[in-house]
Image (cartoon, grey):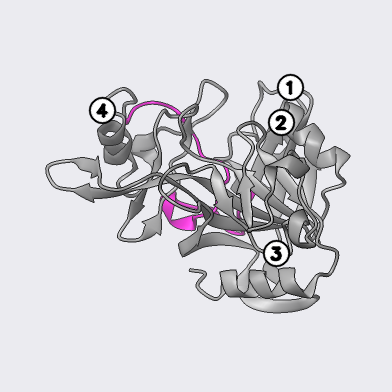
Amino acid sequence: MRIIFSRKGFDSAAGGCPSPIIDGRPVSLPIPTRMPSALRYADLTGDYGDLVEDLTRGRIKRTASCHLDPDLNANVLVRLENWRGCLGQVAAAQSHLANNCVAKGDLFLFWGLFRPVLRQERWTYSGSREHRIFGWLQIGDIIDLGCDGSHVLRDRPWLRDHPHARDGWCQRNALYIASEQLILDGQKTSLPGWGTFRKGHRLSAGDASPSLWTVPDWLNPQRGGVGMTYHPPERWDADGGLQSAARGQEFIAEPAGSREALAWLRTLFQEAA
């Protein structure tokens, strides 16, 4: 099973600020988009409209179009029967996944830039920035959509709200649909194949720089680990640190049945929502 550390949500480039941590829980904000999308922040159930307007100080309005992807939370929209979590990917990032043979059963761990917030008269930041894992998706199916992804709705109408199931994309446009249940080491767990964490997992080592991570030994090649794409040897140190890459969305690791990696995953999923 490959593990893909997948960067998603607001950051300094997309959205211009961190996603919020509310009462300890990371809430990934969908990025604004000019690509095909039927959704606005105001269409999402919850505080998304207020959060976006307040945290960007009005630069992004609640009426702006948003790219709800990965789509992991059933409660943010009215869903059709058989809905599952899913992720769309295109262009160079999709080529990277395909070239590294990402396949059914592999596991996306979604992370992003976050910062604690408080709500008084409006939402405001109240702490330091950090990188945090906020959700997961284990691949149950991969669909090549092409430029016009709307054909997928004939068999899967529950994808009606997904931005990649529309016309207007490049040819390298793919959809990753979650498995029904999360499977670890060949054993079904009690969790679905997608979801968000209550607290998630903090990657950042401290407050100085979110991109300086503390990583487990199974991942760190300086400590016998497997490494991951986009991260050459000079980015790792023997004390368990990693200077994470500023570019790239999908960082792929192949732990190849590592018992240490499996134990790390089991600990991560113990607090899953």
Q: CA distance from mark 2 to mark 3?
A: 31 Å
- Range covered by the magenta-colored residues: 62-86
The residues bearing labels 4 and 2 have C-alpha atoms spaced at a distance of 30 Å
On screen, residue 70 above or below 34:
below
Are discs 1 and 4 less than 8 Å apart at CB? no
- Residue lying at 40% horizontally and 44% vertically, measured from the top left: 129
Q: Quadrant of residue 97?
A: top right
For label 4, the crowd category at 10 Å Cα-Cα, with few meaning under 14, some 14 to 19 and many 20 or more, is few
State the image coordinates of residue 144 (x, y, percent, origin top left).
80, 37
- Report the mark closest to the observer, 2 or 3: 3
Q: Which residue, given by chain and number where applicable, does mark 3 sit on? A: 217
Residue that numbered label 4 is attached to: 57
Of the image marks 4 and 2, the number of the one nearer the N terminus: 4
Q: Foreground mark, 3 or 4?
A: 3
Q: Is residue 180 above or below residue 29?
A: below
Residue neighbourhood size for the residue with mark 2, other residues' Cα within 10 Å, grouped as few (<14), some (14–19), many (≥20): many
Q: Residue at x 67, y 51 (%)?
A: 237
Looking at the image, tell me whether mark 1 or mark 3 is earlier in sequence order: 1
Mark 2 or mark 3, earlier in chain: 2
Name the side, left or right, on which 79 lies relative to 190. Answer: left
The reply to whether the C-beta atoms of the residues labelled 2 and 3 are less than 8 Å apart is: no
Earlier residue among tags 1 and 4: 4
Dot 2 falls on a residue whose secondary structure is: strand
Could you tell me the amino acid type at mark 3? Asp
Q: Is label 1 in contact with label 3 (beta carbons under 8 Å)?
A: no
Q: Residues within 10 Å of mark 1 (few under 14, many from 20)?
A: few
Comparing marks 4 and 2, which lies closer to the viewer? 4
